[in-house]
Image (cartoon, helix red, strand yellow):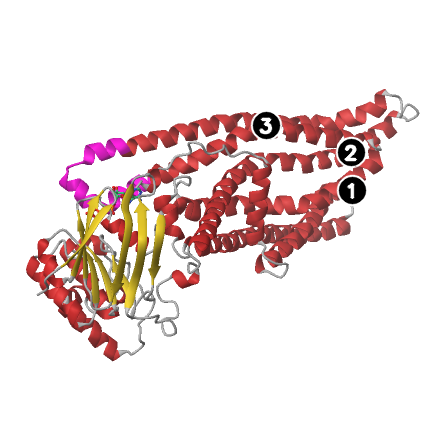
Amino acid sequence: MPPVGRKNLMGVKKPKLDLKFVQRFAGIQRVLFPSWSSQNVLMFGTLLFVTLLEQLIIYQVGVLPSKFYEVLADKDFDAFKGLVILSVILILLNSTLKSLDQYICSLMCVSWRKSLTECLHRAYFQSRVYYTLNVLREDIDNPDQRISQDTERLCKQLSTMASRLIVSPFTLAYYTYQCFYSTGWVGPVSIFGYFVIGTVANKSLMGPIVSTLFLQEKLEGDFRFKHMQIRVNAESAAFYRAGKVEYMRTDRRLQALLHTQRSLMNKEFWLYIGVNTFDYLGGILSYIVIAIPIFTGVYDGLTPGELSALISKNAFVCIYLINCFTQLIDLSTTVSDVAGYTHRIGELKEVMDDIIRKQCDYDPTSGDMYDFDWDMDSHTGPSDTAFVLDRLSYKCPFSDELLVKDLSLKISQGTHLLVVGNTGTGKTSLLRVLNRLWESSSGYVEMTSCFGPRGILFLPQKPYLTDGTLREQVIYPLKEIYPVSGQIDDERIIQYLELAGVSSLLKRTGGLDEAVDWNWYDVLSPGEMQRLCFARLFYLQPKYAVLDEATSALTEEAEGQLYRACKQLGMTLLSLGHRNSLQKYHDVMLRLCGDGRWELTKLKTE
Ligand SMILES: Nc1ncnc2c1ncn2[C@@H]1O[C@H](COP(=O)(O)OP(=O)(O)OP(=O)(O)O)[C@@H](O)[C@H]1O
């Protein structure tokens, strides 16, 4: 299996600020604002109202100094008192509105994150998308990083932009009108022209930032993946005394990440130069705007006093309009971050949709019905066969060589089948094809019984233990106790833990429902894990149990006990394994011989 963190960007188009970005951004907006009446739209509306009110108050606070000059010059004490009270009220209102603005932005960030992550989760956990994405698709790196960190950062950056963006159309329209009123068309046209030049220049500086940010997030995911790998396999690494080599490898990933981060900073440096230059050039633009009519002689008839009054009035509206634009240009760095995250999340969404579409074409029963505990009561299916295979051929995903060719077989109730063969001949792959994790190359395969209790259950080669209590381990992958029968269920669980030889776990955990603070993988031995999986099997009691080397860590004696228990509980077994001792519990043996060849033989059972 290719490690998730190793996937690379080779052959992938560099993400840019292009039409693809617009499409992906629009797609994400549809998730954030699903309908006009959604909570996020209401919050956005409230934010608009609050920021507009804030602008109004800011304007009032802005004119306070001139009013103070006026009353102080007149030595009007009553007016001064009134003005002080008004100032305090306005400042209190202003700070309240500003805090409210920040508070709504933070709430919106959480709410957007919820909507976006839930949308990604729905696709990720639909049928077997998480498997295909992590194991079979090479074109997408670190899906976990995209769902957890990138989504959070995108929402945070969007929320910091929100209050500035939301109010800008209104302030722009108002001050454009004011500027036009004071300076004629020269003011707005030159300021708009200035903004267009600023945007074009910044866009060219933002392009490389988007792709570098995309790469940086990938390397961040790779770095985290390496640490996760060491955390999960700490004991194995310690047995190898592999501290030095793991240090070197982890450090290599860190250096690659830091190198890219530095390159990102370098690219951002030029953008900062662009943004700051436009900020300060904007300061003198207002005087250039006013200078044009002065030097062309439009105001030649005015006295110096009238001219200075006109300059100060025009400068105010021009400066304010330019300020509105420079605030937008200041968002350039945030926009390039947003673009990088948008590409990462948009790409993940597209790939997941593509997987879902392909899976539905290949297997119409995927979707909700694919999962374990779907409507168990109504779909028990025909029971006398589990699988029908007709001239089935399959190969592993990234190769052209067939593992098995033209296999015809029927797996029926009461006939226990053992699959054997050398390493890598495709035993587990057969189960993958039966379970529809992999597509077959040709031929026909059908699962004729339902999945789950009363149907078919797979016990994978690597025991899978979930997080949670002992009860949750035993009933896995059921979400809740089935059937809901309280005390009787407890007795069943305890009885099956004893039958599987792991009743000691009850004492270690302190009870079925005691929360444990350890990682099950760290504290159970491989044998205990396999036994616990058998307790799960006994509890769920499927008609057909598919066991992939499920007793490889146990003694032959323990293996015998568990196999006999399965048979006593009425299960038909389909087992994979290397040991000859397994033969006595099976009726038929399928041997995979490599190069697509196979043979079927009858066995003498005990
Ligand atoms: N996700 C994957 N991508 C590419 N190749 C794979 C993948 N999974 C398995 N393979 C390859 O497919 C071949 C068959 O693998 P499979 O797991 O079926 O072997 P097996 O017969 O069960 O072996 P073992 O006895 O060791 O369990 C192997 O060569 C393996 O490397």
Which disc number belongs to residue 70? 1
Between discs 2 and 3, the one toward the N terminus: 2
In the rendered view, tell whether residue 445 sits above or below residue 184.
below
Amino acid at dot 3: Ser
* Disc 1: CA contacts within 10 A as few (<14), some (14-19) or many (>=20): some
Name the secondary structure under disc 3. Answer: helix
Q: Is residue 84 something that shows in the picture?
A: no
Amino acid found under the numbered disc labelled 2:
Pro
Q: Earlier in the sequence, mark 2 or mark 1?
A: 1
Q: Nearer the viewer, mark 2 or mark 1?
A: 2
Frontmost of labels 3 and 1 is 3
The image shows residue 524 at horizontal and vertical percentages of: 17, 56
Q: Residue at x 85, y 28 (%)?
A: 307
Residue 231 higher or lower than 261, as above or below: below
Which residue, given by chain and number where applicable, does mark 2 sit on?
188
Residue found at the far left of this picture: 557
Badge 1 amino acid = Glu
Q: Residue 580 at x, y = what percent?
A: 9, 54
Quarter holding the C terminus is bottom left
Q: Quadrant of residue 220?
A: top left
Residues rendered magenta in the picture: 224-249
Q: CA distance from mark 2 to mark 3?
A: 24 Å
Asked if disc 3 and disc 1 are in contact, CB closer than 8 Å, the reply is: no
Which residue in the protein does label 3 denote?
204
